[in-house]
Image (spheres, helix red, strand yellow):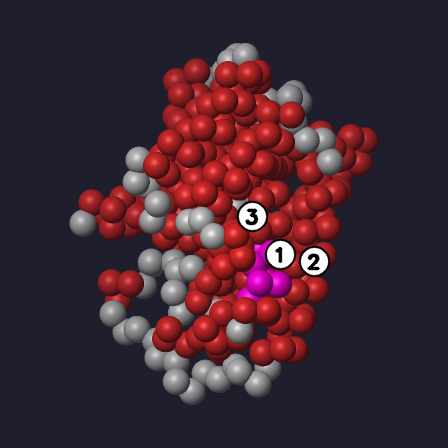
Amino acid sequence: MGIYFIVLGIIVALVHYFFAEIALKTPDFIRLPGFVKYHLGKKIYKIALMSGILGLLGANLVFLIIGGSFLEVIFSPILGFGETFYTIIYFTLGSALIFLGVKAIGKVQLYGIVLLLISLIVLLIKTKDYIDFSGLSFYQDSSYLFMPYGVVLFSLWGLSLIPEAEEILGSKKYLLNKIIFASIFFSILVYIFFIFIVLGIMGDQTTPNFLVGLQDFLGRDITILVMFLAIITTFTSFISIGLTAKKILWYDMGVDKTTASTMTCFIPLLLLFLGFNNFIWVISIVGGIMLAIDGILVSIIYGKIGPLRMKFLIYPVILALVLGSIYEVVNFII
């Protein structure tokens, strides 16, 4: 799994670098579909709208799925009720903040990251005696070779936040690329560290919703601590992505603010109730197809306006994203 984070981390970093350069050369207060329309024209703009909106709303569907399950594990033994009830609570709180347009989300995310780091250190200290890789086996079936592609791509992707970061930086926009690379590098380290702990503890019994399964190994107290911090992290991401989707509908498509907020909040909930509740399946489709399309479009724009000496980088990036998307489509059909 580590090799996936390294290889895809390089690809993601390049796409984010491309987009940062594009954002710096394009008028503010538009998002990715607007950038595509500005540089590639109205026909390609329709593709960008589809992938951008579906990707963001699909991402928030992922956070609804896991957010409700985390809350259920924490509060159900105390208050009762099932996962649907806690999903509605998660949705209601997040949607209220999306409607209001939270301005302090950056600070909330920063505090969440600090708490997450503290929890990882506590987790390592508390679980060092449980970590054992001797009973862990690795599959040999080559048909599963690319299975983590969409999941890993999704976990490292932050493209939609680059215009937000550019606007926040104001006169210090020259720091944008440094922030991007530091963020991706930090994310890779945290993910590899967490994978090391989880596989060392759970081994072959690791499940897609491994945070829920950890309590069978570590007990309820430690697991609840980790889950609280996971909720903070996913919840702030839910709000950030929701605000970005809202702004695409509002800025780029001209939808009025209230309608944009309503669509952003309720479409993921509707999809969840329609049965799109398989965490791995949703995250693979969103990461492997929708986000990949965004990355390809960004690479094409960079090939048009980027410096000549750097344009050769777009070809391996586009090839990797196209092959990954084809794999996810074939895997979905089969």
Name the residue that disc number 1 marks.
229
What is the three-letter code of the residue carrying label 2? Leu
Residue 12 marker: none
Q: Position of residue 82 (x, y in %)?
A: 42, 49
Mark on residue 115?
Answer: 2
The answer to which of marks 1 and 2 sits earlier in the sequence is: 2
Q: Earlier in the sequence, mark 3 or mark 2?
A: 2
Whether 263 is drawn above or below 178: the answer is above
Q: Amino acid at mark 1?
A: Leu
Q: Tell whether label 2 touches label 1 (CB within 8 Å).
A: yes
Q: Tell me the quarter of the picture where residue 251 sits.
A: top right
Q: Where residue 111 sits in the image (x, y, percent)? A: 73, 50
Residue 257 percent location from the top left of the image: 57, 16
165 vs 244, nearest the viewer: 244
**Magenta part, dominant SS:** helix
Q: Amino acid at mark 3?
A: Thr
| Residue at numbered disc 3 | 234
Q: Which quadrant would residue 294 be assigned to in this image?
A: top left
